[in-house]
Image (cartoon, rainbow, N blue to C red):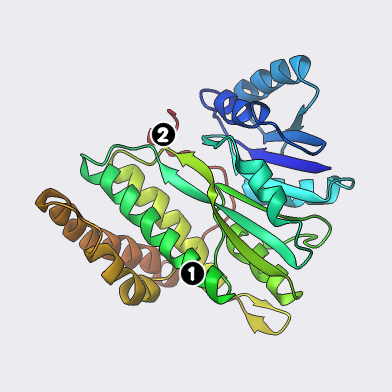
Amino acid sequence: MITIIITSFKEQLTIGKAIDSFLNQNIKEKYEIIVSTPDEETINLVKNYSKKNKHVKLFRDPGKGKMLALNLLFKKIKKSDILILTDGDVYVSKNSVNEILKAFKDPKVGCVTGHPVSINEKKNMLGYWSHLLLHGAHKAREKRNNLGQYFTCSGYLFAFRNRVVKEFQTDIPEDAIIPHIFMAKGYKLKYLPEAQVSVKYPDNFRDWNAQKKRVSKAYINLGKVIYEGKKVPKMKSFLNEAIEGTLIALTYPRNLKEVYFTLMLFPARLYMWLYAYYESKIKKQLHKDAWKQIESTKNI
């Protein structure tokens, strides 16, 4: 049996499409879909789904953040062998679940991740940035996958064997610590480009900076984590972006407009990282688990 966990906060406009993208698949295993959410609007919509479809179940989380909700669910889910994690403001491709299940036929594979794709238009700068950054993440995962190395999964769609991860810190990214736990226990990671998840990214700079800064501050916290005597490696960092990401970024544009958009991304990322380090290291405003909404991503 498999459990699909959809974590959601005030996503009543998008949660239906997220649920349907799983229900419309021909999933070859017994499965359940648990939607974890604290807000009444999303709760009411999920209740309507659960009345019509036995696969859909509701988990009312305490409203203190995604990581706490996941920790509570990990303790609650006993029967399933595979857990698939995704969000309530994205939707997955029709083949995604069976691609994931196929990967787990190898008993050495412990954790897999899908391939996020942007639904934003490339003709504007922020939309173009979303495509470029995802291209960079794709190349980084593809390279590390081929070398058998650690890589960060995508929180938009990843899966792992149940009963291995009991709990994890709530102030660090789940898609970074969970694959590290599996590798530390001798499992392999696998990247699945065919298992796609469609994502709406911010369409204004304020939302873009808030989203990226929040994630970056979580990765700054990750740098202090020791698991079984080893520091957790960081695929996502300012240094990695500068060393590995620069060439990928500069070879991505296909016309002069895209060259301009690419060059504008460098100062934007520098500003975001400096702001993240300033808040974390100087002001001591560390990342904490909490539900925060990025408004311009909630329309898919």
Q: In which quadrant of the rendered view does residue 126 lie?
A: top left
Disc 2 is placed on an element classified as helix
Q: CA distance from mark 2 to mark 1?
A: 24 Å
Left or right side of 1 for 43: left
Instruction: Tell me the quarter of the image containing the C terminus.
Output: top left
Q: Secondary structure at mark 1?
A: helix
Dot 1 crowding, Cα within 10 Å, few <14, some 14–19, many 20+: many
Q: Residue furthest left?
A: 256
Q: Please give left or right for residue 258 compared with residue 129 in the image.
A: left
Do we see residue 64 in this rendering?
Answer: no
Instruction: Work out whether 134 lies above or below 11.
Output: below
In terms of depth relative to the viewer, which is nearer, 253 or 157?
Answer: 253
Outermost residue to the bottom:
229
Of 227 and 79, nearer the camera is 79
- Residue drawn where x is 27% and y is 63% of the image: 249
The x and y percentages for residue 198 are 47, 39
Q: Position of residue 59 (x, y in %)?
A: 75, 34
- Residue appearing at x 54%, y 29% in the figure: 11
In percent of width and height, residue 173 lies at: 58, 59
**Residue 172, quarter of the rendered image:** bottom right
Residue 261 seen in render? yes
Q: Which residue is mark 2?
A: 295
Q: Dot 2, how many residues are within 10 Å of its Cα: few (below 14), some (14-19), or many (20+)?
A: some
Numbered badge on residue 220: 1
Q: Which amino acid type is marked by label 1?
A: Ile
